[in-house]
Amino acid sequence: MHAAALPPIPLSPVGDDTSDAAASVAPRQLRAALGLFATGVTIVTALGDNGEPVGLTVNSFNSVSLDPPLVLWSLALRSSALTAFERAERYAIHILSADQKDIAELFARRGDDRFAAIDWAPGQFGAPVIAGAAALFECRARSRYVEGDHVILVGEVEHCTSRSGVTPLIFHGGRFYTELPL
């Protein structure tokens, strides 16, 4: 059930990363500038090799295509969850609602038994599904691309749901926001 559908992720960047532009932008400066881009907050979940649920908070989520239905997210190559998501055939992406800030913080921390503290169940294709999300995308792993210090994971959406009238959780400038300013 958990056999790798995709080839293993190479642990070294692909392409030429020795450009002059890369050398001229300090990581701290880049992080500060990127923090000015407001994003939604997601939690991505899958089952690990041992059948135990794994998941983490992610704000690097985006749509790719409506036909076929594709979404993407990225994961740091140094993440402790890398192996689980490298091997997962399916995963679930949850867009969090404003009342799920505590869950976002829980899944952003290391070492906690995240799933013991939340309401979840296996989804249609086996990946853990967290109750109360504003939207849910159950995906089949389609492709992966290593770029810099992250891997970009593209998933084909096999099932999705959403709740109307729900305020999303937002991340901006290193902080969560639960209200939308006018």
Image: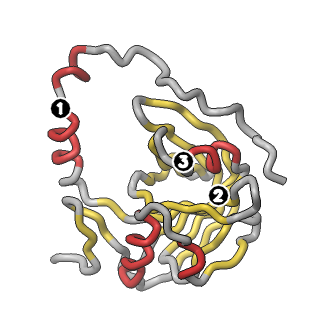
Amino acid type at image mark 2: Tyr
Q: Residue at x 70, y 32 (%)?
A: 7
Instruction: Identify the residue under disc 2.
Output: 91
Q: Position of residue 158 (x, y in %)?
A: 70, 59
- Disc 3, disc 2: CB below 8 Å? no
**To which quarter of the image does residue 1 belong?**
bottom right
First of labels 3, 1 by sequence position = 1
Q: Position of residue 119 (x, y in %)?
A: 59, 84
Q: Position of residue 71 (x, y in %)?
A: 54, 51
Point out the image quarter for the C terminus.
Answer: bottom left
**Can residue 68 be spotted in the picture?**
no
Numbered label attached to residue 26: 1
Query: Residue 37, relative to residue 113: is it above or below?
Result: above
Amino acid type at image mark 3: Ser
Position of 34 with respect to 149 (left or right) is left
Taking the view exactly as shown, the residue that stands out farthest to the right is 1
Position of 11 with respect to 21 (left or right) is right
SS for dot 1: loop
Q: Position of residue 11 (x, y in %)?
A: 54, 28
Numbered label attached to residue 65: 3
- Disc 3, disc 1: CB below 8 Å? no
